[in-house]
Amino acid sequence: MKLKNLWVITMIVSSLFLIATFSVEAEDITDGTNDVNSIDMTTGESKVVTYSPDINVDNLDLIKATYTQQGIQATVSLQVKGNIENRGKIIDINNPDALNFNAVEYDFELTTSEQDYFISYSNETGQLLIGGNEQINLTSSDFSAVGDTLTISFALTSANETYSNLSVTSTYLKVDLSDEASLVFLSDVAPNLPLAVSYAYASNIGSIGENIQFNGSVEPLTGQPPYIYHWDFGDESTSTQLNPTHTYTKAGVYTYTFTVTDNADATASQSDNITISAEGGGTKDSLSTQMILFLAILLIVIVIGVVVIVWIIRR
């Protein structure tokens, strides 16, 4: 009788051990469609696009991401509205023409209780970066890109790790440094980052009766598009355009505010001041010069940002 009881206890313990060993931890992330962002390199404006002459935008439009863990084995996957696109290799640092790109990359950033992982896939090649320093080249047996779904499996550093956070990004980068240099940057991220205003700008001086240009922009890949724009010019006048013009009728110092509301009713704002003087207090030439200087500085910042993004991707 005692032997039988011992056998039953042993079977129960063994069953519990097997259940613990083969238990699966899973997390899902969903993302709205038609929220791929583009940066216009002539104006610095970030906007949602559904068409591009360079690529099928649906192949970048993230729908869902999933994380599963069974013991030490982790699997991440993403689904796009179109199909997983195999084009170019952003991570190919041995390319003799490395400063020119026409490539698509899909990235996962995973955080567990013990480690950070960065997993990238581009044109049937993959890399795993562990803790920011250990780099592992993935083989074809580690990933699958079929139709609209990309799946990548890899080993965690410990079976005791638990899920903390996952984000996924799709990126299309086209860089042509020929005589007519051009740059196309399209991207989607899931989950969406909190809504943020990139800038709200106008000249800091103006004159009565002058048409003053106001420019606003939403931080790329933030919020849930489409967006609603609202300008308050500080003189009881408003506009719902993204880049409106406005004429003040009285001298004074005005505080203008640019507010963006996204599809999830989140809001973000940015304010600044403009001084309006009597007629003739400002000149069109000075305002144009300030605007050109602002856009030039903005363009430089964007280019530097893209270079940094490429450097991070190619680590």
Image (spheres, rainbow, N blue to C red):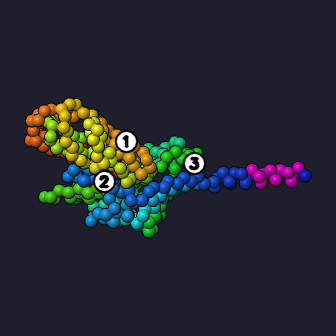
Which is nearer the N-term, disc 3 or disc 2? 2
Which is nearer the N-term, disc 3 or disc 1? 3
Residue at horizontal 34 percent and vertical 62 percent from the top: 50
Check residue 47 in the rendering and tell me which mark sits there, or answer none.
2
Q: Report the mark closest to the observer, 3 or 2.
A: 2
Residue at the limit of the structure toward the top, as seen here: 252
In the image, is residue 212 above or below residue 108? above
Can residue 145 be seen here? The reply is no
- Image quadrant in which you'd find residue 147: bottom left
Check residue 159 in the rendering and tell me which mark sits there, or answer none.
3
Give the Cα separation between the discs numbered 1 and 2: 16 Å
Front-most of 130 and 178?
178
Can residue 85 be seen here? The reply is yes
Q: Is residue 148 left or right of residue 229?
A: right
Amino acid type, label 3: Ala
Give the Cα separation between the discs numbered 3 and 2: 42 Å
Residue at horizontal 21 percent and vertical 50 percent from the top: 43
The boundaries of the magenta stretch are 2-13
Q: Position of residue 115 (x, y in %)?
A: 49, 44
Q: Which residue is mark 1?
A: 268
User: For the residue labelled by badge 1, is the local secondary structure a helix, a strand or a loop?
Assistant: strand
Front-most of 205 and 84?
205
Mark 3, other Cα within 10 Å: few <14 / some 14–19 / many ≥20: some
